[in-house]
Structures are given as structure tokens and as C-alpha cells.
Amino acid sequence: MDVIQSQAHLYNTFVHSAKVEYNFFECYPEWWDFWVKETVKYMKIWFSSHMRNKLSQEQKDQMIPITWTRFEDLVASPKDSLTDLMRVFVGLHDLEGTNAERNVQRVLDMEISKTRTYKLKDSKVTFNKSRHCYTDEQYNFIKDELKEVIYYFGYANVGDNPYGYYDYEEHDPEMLEIFNGYKSNNIEMIRRICSSTD
């Protein structure tokens, strides 16, 4: 949900670090409802063509590899996230002794303020901070329309998932099969990228 509001600010200010001086959902509720539904529609189309969980292995092998990095993962386990990004960039699974490994460690050793590429809108790192901006109807719309995306990226309330922002009373077996699917995708894509450079 944070990305929908963040994108609205970006489109209205043309910069990542700024916010408009009002709350969309309070001052312009009709526009906000339109924005939420349109954004969700396009997110659903985009992700359906990029998630790849319904493609055959042959189809996946013919496509350009895509890996996913969630903001939550960068915050919770920056070393793992940055190491995987470097594996993609340099095409090596084992980074031991490489400049890539040294660069990851250099970033980890920096003060947090020096690792930011732009000033954040809010200095606190919080997840799902935009929930209050959505009516129950909008929340349910997102939950229903992006169900596959929500499960794939681990945002469903499965088990004790700390990122289970979306509550589903029952979990469909096919959704549980793809829960956190982005992780297995990343493992496979990194394997593919690294094996092509051997």
C-alpha cells in the first residue's frame, strides 16, 4: 500500500523526497479512490507479465532474468540483499575476495545517512505506514485484485509472517504454493545468471 501513495506523491511533485502538502485521501477522496483503483489495475497487469510463476521452465529460460528486492529485506537483512544484487551485477555466485564483496561490506560499514541516495520523506523506517490512507473498501479491493502479488511477495498473513499486511481468513492452496515465490525466483535467476558467466 505504501507504494500507491508514494507513487501519487512522485507524480505530483516529480521527486522521490517530497510530499504534497495535503492528504489525498482526505482532501480529494474521489480522486484518491480513482488513483488507488487505476494503480492497482496497472500493477496487476505489470506483475502478471513479470512474476513468471505460471510459465514453463522452457519459457522462463528464454526470458531475461529478473530478481526482486523488497524494501523490507534491504532493511532487515541488508548484507544478504546487497550480496544478491552484486551477484546479479557481476555474474558470480561466490563473491569471496572480489571488489563486489568489498563494496557490500563498505556500504554496510557506512553510517545509515550516507547510504541514502535522497532525503527520505520521513526519517523513521516503518513498514505499511500508509494503511490509514485507505478505506476498508479500498483495502479489500487491493487485497482481492492483487492477491497473487501479495502472496508472491510475502505480504499475506501466513503463519507468523511479520510482513503479513493483508489479512485473509482462509488461504487458498494455490496461493500458499506461491507464498514468498520471489525468493525461489531470485535463487533460480541468480543461478542462471552466474552459470551463464562460468
Image (cartoon, rainbow, N blue to C red):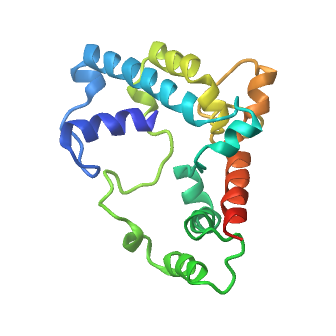
Q: Is residue 128 above or below residue 140?
A: below
Residue 171 in view in this figure: yes
Q: Nearer the viewer, residue 181 or 45?
A: 45
Q: How many marks?
A: 0
Q: Nearer the viewer, residue 58 or 164?
A: 58
Residue shown at the point (70%, 48%) measured from the top left: 183
Residue shown at the point (67%, 53%) measured from the top left: 189
Residue shown at the point (29%, 49%) measured from the top left: 16
Image-based side of 14 in relation to 75, left or right: left
Residue 162 in view in this figure: no
Q: Is residue 65 above or below residue 133?
A: below
Q: Is residue 78 above or below residue 43?
A: below
Image-based side of 34 in relation to 149, left or right: left
Q: Which of the 4 image quadrants contains residue 153? A: top right
Q: Nearer the viewer, residue 164 or 98?
A: 98
| x and y, in percent, of residue 34 in the image | 32, 16
Q: Which of the 4 image quadrants contains residue 196? A: bottom right
Residue shown at the point (72%, 54%) measured from the top left: 187
| x and y, in percent, of residue 57 in the image | 76, 39
Image-based side of 93 in relation to 18, left or right: right
Quadrant in which the C terminus is drawn:
bottom right
